[in-house]
Image (spheres, helix red, strand yellow):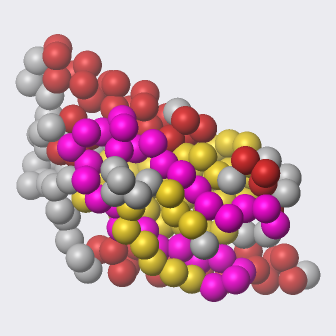
Amino acid sequence: MPSLFFSAALIAALALLPVAHAAKGHAHGEGRLDVAIGKEQIVLSLELPLDAAIGFERAPKNDKEKALLAAAAATLNDAAALFLPTPAASCTLHSVQIDMPQFDGGAHADIAANYTFRCANPAALKSIETTLFRSFKRLYRIEVQRVSPAGQGAARLSPKQSVLSW
């Protein structure tokens, strides 16, 4: 029964994290990442301004821009290459959900992505490295909030500091 309680607590904590991020607003070049670490899984929720991924925040106007949008979606779908948990934790990708902008007239367009990893040796999980900065050159910062059974924390990732450690 404790794992059921923890799952409910983890879901509640995740529900609160985007509220804190939303208050900061949309900033070009700055992504947001919420990390929830459970008993045997990691849930990552990424919010990325479309401008940081492809250089504009509007509907694509031509085939070249459509290709940029498709390439960004393909990159974001390759979660096992984007997020590298501590190898000793033996984590494998379980699910990916990418929500690309619908271009419904809003001033800003964001990509939302959710990733779930399952870890065979969760006690060995000490960090997660991201390759997002290599894939998206306009991305210069990711504000991170983390919650786990051991507590919570915040960090800022950058091209020079792309590893979240705890």
Give residue 79's position: percent from left, percent from top: 55, 40
Q: Is 11 in front, or is 156? A: 156
- Residue most toward the front? 160
Location of residue 127 (image quadrant):
bottom right
Identity of the residue drawn at 59% across and 77% down: 147
Q: Return the x and y of residue 159 as percentages of the image width and height.
A: 34, 50
Quarter in which the C terminus is drawn: bottom right
Query: Magenta span covers which residues?
Result: 123-151
Q: Is residue 152 left or right of residue 123?
A: left
In the image, residue 130 above or below residue 137: below
Relative to 24, say whether 117 is above or below: above
Q: Residue at x 50, y 41 (%)?
A: 82
Residue 100, percent from left and from top: 33, 41
161 up-or-down from 92: above or below: below
Quarter holding residue 152: bottom right
Quarter occupied by the N terminus: bottom right
**Residue closest to the eye, 64 or 132:** 132
Q: At x 85% / y 52%, what residue is drawn? A: 120
| Residue at 70% across, 83% down | 150
On the image, the x and y values in percent for residue 133 come to 35, 44
Q: Can I make out residue 112 in this image?
A: yes
